[in-house]
Image (cartoon, helix red, strand yellow):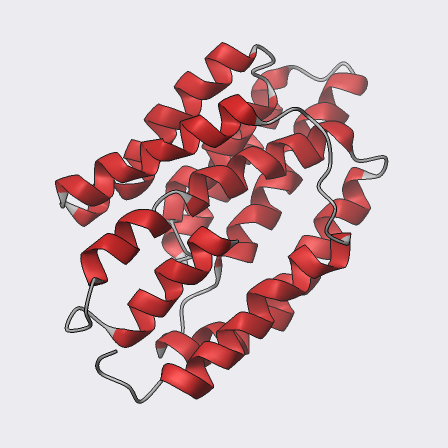
Amino acid sequence: MISMLIDHIAAVLGPMSINYVVMRCIGRIAMPLFCYMIAEGCRHTRNPWKYFGRLAAFALISQLPFSYAFGVRTPNVYVNLAFAVLAVTCIELFKSKRIPIFFGLLVALILAIFAEHIGADYGFVVVPLIVLLYFTQNKRMQIIVIGFGAIILNIGSGFAPYVLSGTGACVFVGLYNGKLGNLPRWFSYWFYPVHLIVLGYVFGQATFF
């Protein structure tokens, strides 16, 4: 969350702000980690449909703050995260019903294409990355997937420091011990829309530090 906050401060202030590139590079770590933690959440949740419902609800809650902070009308990242959980849930449901996994993967592909079509934050990449992380059990392979995923997530920027800095997420994945942190669960959900409202209000009209 700290990485995301730093990234969003830089994004709101714009490229004319001091240390903009450094802050955006730090921020590139955030999305690969969110993808990893969503995959972990899919593995450990007792009710995947409720998990999807929470993410979908916060996609709705976060849309106005997202538009307010960044001045855009495209869907926020919660939309893509919810799509990914829906894709994983469908794949597991089809497996339990002995329906060929192809159809579950087809659902994931359709959701990824739809995310790209509507301009959801990070576009096509998020759904397949989370699905791949979900089915990758070996920690070493997870780190490799996160590394490549971080590059693909950021390659659209065309700016090498942004593309490569996201691979720093590999360090945090390697250090993760599989245990939940001490923060309340709902804090993690509410942090996103609340910090966007604060940033939009405090920094929305600023042009420099």
Q: Quadrant of the C terminus?
A: bottom left
Q: At x 27% / y 48%, what residue is drawn?
A: 25
Residue at image point 28% right, 42% down = 154
Q: Nearer the viewer, residue 48 or 9?
A: 9
Q: Position of residue 5 (x, y in %)?
A: 45, 61
Q: Is 67 rendered above or below residue 111?
A: below
Counting the numbered discs, the total is: 0
Q: Is residue 19 left or right of residue 176?
A: left
Could one spot residue 110 in this view of the protein? no
Indicate the position of residue 7 as horizontal and vertical percent values.
36, 59
- Which of the 4 image quarters holds residue 163? top left
Q: Who's the residue at 20% across and 62% down the image?
A: 19
Residue 128 visible in the snapshot = yes
Residue 41 placement (x, y as % from top left): 69, 36
Q: Is 89 left, or right, of 145 in this rendering? A: right
Q: Is residue 160 above or below residue 204?
A: above
Nearest the eye: 21 or 120:
21
In this view, 60 is above or below 22: below
Horizontal and vertical percent for residue 22? 23, 53
